[in-house]
Image (cartoon, helix red, strand yellow):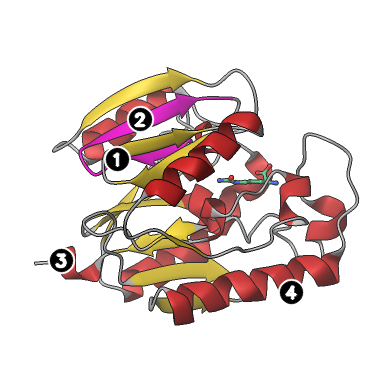
């Protein structure tokens, strides 16, 4: 995880959710891989610890729900920008109820809640890349055009462009923000190149966080938190 880049992000809060035991056997996955549950939970604790103690965020920890095996991947169920939170309609039916606890938490934080209630729309937060100036929305197995249109309608102050996602699960399965104005794109070899870019940054700080287990069910690090900047609220 590369972080603490001045001017970009500036987050104050993060919402995370604990891993249910059902993740090991029942979480959705593209490849059949065995998950070591205890290791996954340990890795997740370290991740949450980094958000709290190294990045100084106020972390809201939602309890796991055994009936929702993918509930740790909170990024997919809400898109927060400024003081507005769009509660998504996840592409996988089995994940739709994950929105309930997230909605409650974001209401508690006093954000303006907008629902994606159109039954033709689907959108996973993992397909939403916000650069600070604009949104890119991946059209994937989980996110459709209607979902992207609703997002554009909710966040009217920003340009929204769609990007076809043909390989992998989500847009952010292979790209992410690396800093102000810097989108990093990569899997394996390109990812190594992205790391080199981070190393060149003046204020660069690299905090290694292992994610060996959750990646087996297609979970990346960004998908395990919803980041919020409360100072943006008027
Ligand atoms: C799924 O297939 O929905 C989960 N097993 C993984 C979701 C990962 N989400 C993300 O990267 N934003």
The answer to which of marks 1 and 3 sits earlier in the sequence is 1
Q: Is residue 12 left or right of residue 212?
A: left
Q: CA distance from mark 2 to mark 3?
A: 23 Å
Q: Residue furthest left?
A: 234
Q: Residues within 10 Å of mark 2 (few under 14, many from 20)?
A: some
Dot 1 and dot 3 residues touching (CB under 8 Å)? no
What span is colored magenta in the figure? 126-140
The answer to which of marks 1 and 2 sits earlier in the sequence is 1
Dot 1 and dot 2 residues touching (CB under 8 Å)? yes
Q: CA distance from mark 4 to mark 2?
A: 32 Å
Looking at the image, in which quadrant does ligand 1 appear? top right
Residue at 46% over, 27% down:
138
Q: Is residue 139 magenta?
A: yes
Residue at 87% over, 62% down:
36
Q: Position of residue 61 (x, y in %)?
A: 52, 77
The answer to which of marks 1 and 4 sits earlier in the sequence is 4
Q: CA distance from mark 1 to mark 3?
A: 19 Å
């Amino acid at each position: 995880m590369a972080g603490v880049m001045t001017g970009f992000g500036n987050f104050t809060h993060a919402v995370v959710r604990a891993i249910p035991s059902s993740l090991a056997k029942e979480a959705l996955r593209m490849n059949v891989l065995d998950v070591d549950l205890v290791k996954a939970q340990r890795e997740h604790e370290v991740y949450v610890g980094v958000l709290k103690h190294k990045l100084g965020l106020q972390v809201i920890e939602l309890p796991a729900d055994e009936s929702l095996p993918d509930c740790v991947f909170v990024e997919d169920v809400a898109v927060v920008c400024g003081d507005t939170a769009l509660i998504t309609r996840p592409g996988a039916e089995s994940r739709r109820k994950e929105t309930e606890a997230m909605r409650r938490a974001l209401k508690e934080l006093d954000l303006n809640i907008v629902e994606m209630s159109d039954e033709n729309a689907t959108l996973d937060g993992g397909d939403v890349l916000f650069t600070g100036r604009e949104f890119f929305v991946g059209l994937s197995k989980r996110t459709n055009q209607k979902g992207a249109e609703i997002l554009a309608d909710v966040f009217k102050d920003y340009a929204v462009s769609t990007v076809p996602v043909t390989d992998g699960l989500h847009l952010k399965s292979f790209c992410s923000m690396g800093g102000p104005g810097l989108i990093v794109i990569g899997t394996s070899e390109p990812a190594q190149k992205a790391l080199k870019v981070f190393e060149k940054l003046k204020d660069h700080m690299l905090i290694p966080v292992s994610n060996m287990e959750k990646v087996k069910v297609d979970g990346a690090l960004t998908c395990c938190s919803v980041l919020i900047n409360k100072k943006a609220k008027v």
